Amino acid sequence: MRVKTRALVTAAGLALALMASGCGADDGDGGTSGSGNKKVEVFTWWADGGEKAGLDGLVAQFKTDCSQYEFVNGAVAGGAGSNAKQVLASRLQQSDPPDTFQAHAGAELTDYIKAGQIEDLSAQYKEWGLSSAFPKGLVDSLTVGGKIYSVPANIHRANVLWANKTVLANAGITAPAKTMPEFFTQLDTLKAKGIATPLALGKDWTQQMLFEAVLISRLGPDKFNGLWSGKTDWAGADVTDAINDYKKLLTYSNKDRDTFDWTDAEKLLMEGKAAFQLMGDWEAADLDAKNFKDYSYSVFPGNGDAYQWLADSFVLPKGAKNPEGTKCWLKTLGSAAGQKAFNVKKGSIPARTDSVATDYPAYQQAAIADWAKGTPVPSCPHGSACSQGWQGAVGSAQGKFSSDGDVASLQKALVAAAKQFAGK
């Protein structure tokens, strides 16, 4: 789901570049609406590694299913879609939407819905049989005011701890930690064995992911879910304990974490300079694409059967130049063949319940089994738990905490963010 940030690229520069390229791409019959429009611009942040491989697989299926249309790649690189979302916001504001764009399923979509920027797809769900193909709980999560606005391509898991097997073996660590105290013991062991950075970490949303995993360990799935529904108090003592655990974890991470994207942290793991990295399961596809096989994975210590889910989804923007072409893309995306073509290479699992687990690599097979029996919990940095405004407020607070380590200040900011954005 993530791509490497291109250094020092401003949102304004990206917008101008994308608009310029869009003008070039609209030459001929693709530049006007109507029956002559054959081009379908698909706007994503999938530009590298396993993410691009997944997109390529889906595009191949689209070309088979929708040969009357031409795929136009509107990808904009940037971790967690940070650059892409800025460019997209500019285009939507100027009434120049792509034909479809990537968004995280869940609460993140409410911003677009309230702004009247995306179309209702409920009729297409019935026409394409998606209401029965997707799990009821997922369909319920996608439904806002009785309407469905996106088609999910997959289900990702966020709370996965990846490890370099050789580094662990050399330190005498033979089994995953089940609790936070066990994990701290392992991190101390690694430091004693000369691993200066036992836990690789990046900036922004990667730090939010790690913090959420710690929150799940301290609060459990039900109380963690309550943080986003208003049933759990962000000012509570258990949240304070989680912040202190998180602060301690930062002492085992690389000091330059605030300059790293997730793939930079992943490189520390691959090079044996770090033992662990908390990251979503798109890392499996990325490591495989880079031909690195010396890795293992486990649920984050203390998370139990909590399955922190997120889903990449696509929408039909209002004012799209080629709505029929977009519908063909969305139909392919939701189909069994489309989900297989995408997820086998992406590292995620299909959203459909009729997929065959043995069609997938080892990690996905394990994830499919865990999803079937696990307790789902959402993710704020990946949009399933909170709005984009809430994401931004938490990100700013945690960026400050990475520098000053002020527990009280972070908790106060989290309380304020919940008060401002909950229910919006």
Image (cartoon, rainbow, N blue to C red):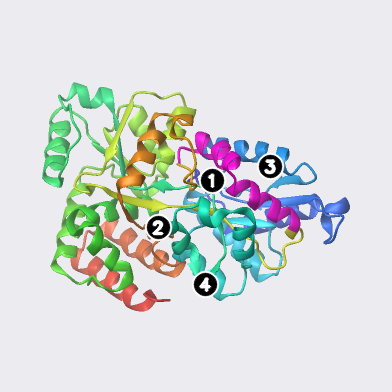
Q: Which residue is mark 4?
A: 146
Q: Which residue is mark 3?
A: 62
Does 143 appear above or below 333? below
Mark 2 to mark 3: distance in Å?
29 Å
| Of the two numbered discs 3 and 1 in the rendering, the one whose residue sits closer to the viewer | 3
Within the magenta stretch, is there residue 394? no
Find numbered disc 4 in the image and state the secondary structure of the residue it sits on. Answer: loop
Does 41 appear above or below 390? above
Question: Residue 292's spot in the image, x, y percent?
Answer: 41, 25
**In the picture, which quadrant includes the C terminus?**
bottom left
Q: Which residue is mark 2?
A: 381
The range drawn in magenta is 324-348
Mark 3 to mark 4: distance in Å?
29 Å
Which of marks 2 and 4 precedes in the sequence?
A: 4
Mark 1 to mark 4: distance in Å?
39 Å
Q: Which mark is residue 6?
A: 1
